[in-house]
Image: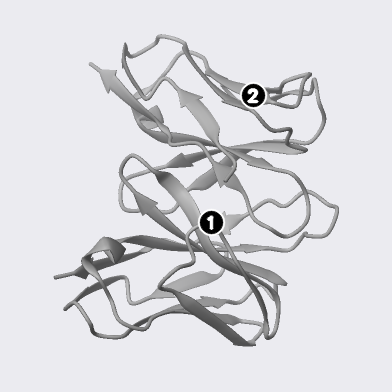
Amino acid sequence: GQQLNQSPQSMFIQEGEDVSMNCTSSSIFNTWLWYKQDPGEGPVLLIALYKAGELTSNGRLTAQFGITRKDSFLNISASIPSDVGIYFCAGQRGGADGLTFGKGTHLIIQP
Amino acid sequence: DAGITQSPRHKVTETGTPVTLRCHQTENHRYMYWYRQDPGHGLRLIHYSYGVKDTDKGEVSDGYSVSRSKTEDFLLTLESATSSQTSVYFCAISAVGGSGANVLTFGAGSRLTVL
């Protein structure tokens, strides 16, 4: 099946630092999405990207849809304790066949 | 959780027993999905539905069946549970399909342990 390579697998940072994570694929996707999952809950959508080259912000979060349609990145500026969680990228080619997910980036913030 | 209810939220069962997980939505969305989440694998699609009685297989469908007799309900059945099916199962819904972007909204998950 389709593979999304998400990196890094985990990040240990200090509060206030900026965070960057990315996803790459060998296949083209027409939509890229970024989700966050808190312990014991389902993933929650953070940002959706619909066009190649698109750069979208949501508060301290910024995500970009790569020009080649094969990659995307997510940046978090000035991290705070509630940013802790697992971040997933997801790609979709089109149609109703669901999303392909990366394996997640665990973000841990050290006091 | 945007009108998505999964039940049961937790279940422990024995190998070889049948198990059914239920996803109920109040959003009247056309598309519904079942994913499983395992350490090291992320979220993987099991089955999905694009309408009443219309379903299709996902990446990891072996050992699972689904049914959708009403728009609001999507059932996932393990006919004979195995230990490899111990996982957290997530239901998701979407209003957009076809050639449009497909943004999924997830339920809170059902944790299944097969002993």
The correct choice, above or below, for A58 with respect to A35 in the image is above
On the image, numbered disc 2 is attached to which residue? A72
Residue sitting nearer the eye, B27 or B95: B95
In the picture provided, is A27 more to the left or to the right than B3?
Answer: right
The correct choice, above or below, for A17 with respect to A81 in the image is above
On the image, numbered disc 1 is attached to which residue? B59
> Could you tell me the amino acid type at mark 1?
Glu
Per the rendering, the mark at residue B16 is none
Chain letter of disc 1 in the image: B
Classify residue B74 by image quadrant. bottom right
Q: Position of residue B6 (x, y in %)?
A: 43, 72
How was this image coloured? one colour
The correct choice, above or below, for B6 with respect to A79 in the image is below
Residue sitting nearer the eye, A52 or A29: A29
Tell me how many marks there are: 2
Residue A62 shows in the view: no
Give the crowd class for mark 2: few <14, some 14-19, many >=20 residues within 10 Å: many
Which type of secondary structure does the marked residue at label 2 adopt? Answer: strand
In the picture provided, is B92 more to the left or to the right than A26?
Answer: left
| Image quadrant in which the C terminus of chain A is located | top left
Residue at point 78%, 60% (across, down): B97
Chain letter of disc 2 in the image: A
In the picture provided, is B82 more to the left or to the right than B25?
Answer: left
* Callouts 2 and 1 on one subunit: no
> Could you tell me the amino acid type at mark 2?
Ser
The correct choice, above or below, for B59 with respect to A31 in the image is below
Residue at point 69%, 33% (across, down): A27
In the image, farthest residue toward the left: B115
CA gap between label 2 and label 1 equals 22 Å
Give the crowd class for mark 1: few <14, some 14-19, many >=20 residues within 10 Å: few
